[in-house]
Image (cartoon, helix red, strand yellow):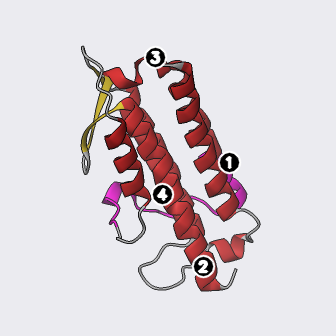
Amino acid sequence: MAPEIRSEIVQVLENSRQELTSAASSLSDQHAAISPEAGRWSVLQCMEHVTFVEGRFLGWLEQAKHLETPTVDKDKEARMAAMVTDRSFRAEAPEAARPTGRFTSVAQALDEFNDARTRTIRFTEERSGDLYSIEVVHPRFGPMNGAEFVRIIAGHAQRHAAQIREVRAAIGH
């Protein structure tokens, strides 16, 4: 992978990290635990979900199948990134990825998310030469190369940053 593409993918991860951090920061732990209505997640629940999924997806990347021929489809990459960030439709999280109340503070949630994101960035930097040569099968989106999958990870954090902003607006913070 060309250095500028690797740099771009890492920057996408960093930007989504900043977006999620900004959305959750400066909120009291008490307010972060408030669910705006039945069936909607609190900020802490959103953070728990994003952190869990980040770790899970990184595990899938680490165990990914190696392809003999790299697959590069920049249009698909862009479509996937746009689709995952689109909040005009509600996606139901699978049971395993639903929050369980693991986080009790914004600081704890941000620390664990940042640890997970740092591991994702490290993987992306270390494997940048073959991100297009690994394949992960996402249960909803199907087969994807590593670069597409990393963009899904970044987009997932952006999606939930938008959700956190919605929650904050709904609870008046």
Residue 81 x/y as whole percent: 41, 49
Which badge, 3 or 4, comes first in the chain's sequence? 4
Q: Nearer the viewer, mark 3 or mark 4?
A: 3
Which badge, 2 or 1, comes first in the chain's sequence? 2
Q: Nearer the viewer, residue 61 or 19?
A: 19
Mark 4–mark 1 distance (CA, rounded to whole Å): 14 Å
**Mark 1 highlights which residue?**
111
Identify the residue shown where x is 46% and y is 45%: 153
Q: Quadrant of the C terminus?
A: bottom right
Inspect the image, locate mark 4, and give the three-letter code of the amino acid beneath it: His
**Mark 4 highlights which residue?**
49
The quarter of the displayed image where residue 75 is located: top left
Mark 3–mark 4 distance (CA, rounded to whole Å): 30 Å
Q: Which element type, helix, strand or loop, lies under badge 3?
A: helix
63 lies left or right of 114? left
Mark 2–mark 1 distance (CA, rounded to whole Å): 20 Å
**Does 142 sit above or below residue 170?**
above
Q: Which element type, helix, strand or loop, lies under badge 1?
A: helix
Neighbours of disc 1 within 10 Å: few (<14), some (14-19), many (20+):
some
Question: On residue 34, which mark appears?
Answer: 2
Residue found farthest to the front: 75
Find out whether the residues at labels 1 and 3 contact each other: C-beta distance under 8 Å: no
Mark 4–mark 2 distance (CA, rounded to whole Å): 15 Å
Identify the residue shown where x is 26% and y is 19%: 67
**Mark 3 highlights which residue?**
129
Q: Nearer the viewer, mark 1 or mark 3?
A: 3
Residue bounds of the magenta highlight: 91-113
Which badge, 3 or 2, comes first in the chain's sequence? 2
Residue 118 x/y as whole percent: 61, 35
Which badge, 4 or 2, comes first in the chain's sequence? 2
